[in-house]
Image: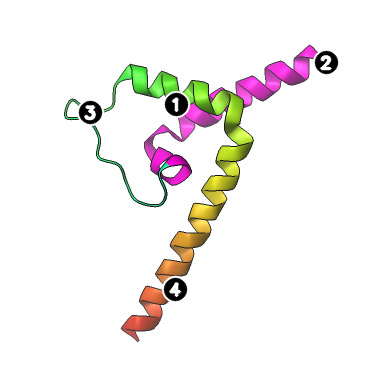
Amino acid sequence: MNIYIYLFLLFGAVFGLATYSYQHVFSEGPHKVETPQGGPNLGGRVLWALVCSFLWPIMVLTGLNSARILAKRKRQAAAANH
């Protein structure tokens, strides 16, 4: 049973590290958040990985919802241009 827990947490950490630069899609909505003046720091990346370690299923669902919203906006913009 422990192997499933370890795999869940490991997948979440990898998911968090892979999606750090796109975290605005998963937590803040489809708008990009301004990065700190010094650029992204290690503490922010570690915090995001820790949050995703435990909450990656929710992050996936919110990411899918944001992707749906962005696709809808893109379709509306394309329709308005034609």
- Disc with the residue nearer the chain's start (3 vs 4): 3
* Residue 11 vertical position relative to residue 65 in the rendered view, above or below: above
Residue in the picture at 42% in, 19% down: 46
Q: Which residue is mark 3?
A: 39
Instruction: Answer with the quarter of the image where residue 22 lies.
Output: top left
Callouts 3 and 1 close, C-beta under 8 Å: no
Q: CA distance from mark 3 to mark 4?
A: 33 Å
Q: Which disc is residue 1 wearing?
A: 2
Which structural element holds mark 1? helix
Q: Which mark is residue 75?
A: 4
Q: Percent position (x, y) of residue 68? A: 52, 60
Lower sequence index among marks 1 and 2: 2
Taking the view exactly as shown, the residue that stands out farthest to the top is 2
The residue that appears at 45% across and 40% down in the rendered structure is 27
Density class for disc 2 (Cα within 10 Å; few <14, some 14-19, many ≥20) is: few
Q: Which numbered disc, 1 or 4, marks the residue that appears first in the sequence?
A: 1
Q: Amino acid at mark 1?
A: Trp
Q: In front: mark 3 or mark 1? A: 1
Give the amino acid type for the residue marked by disc 4 in the picture: Arg
Instruction: Specify the segment rendered in magenta.
Output: 1-27
Mark 3: which amino acid?
Gly
In the figure, 82 relative to 66: above or below? below
**Marks 1/4: CA distance?**
31 Å
Main SS category, magenta section:
helix
Task: Name the residue tied to disc 1.
Answer: 48
Q: Residue furthest front?
A: 28
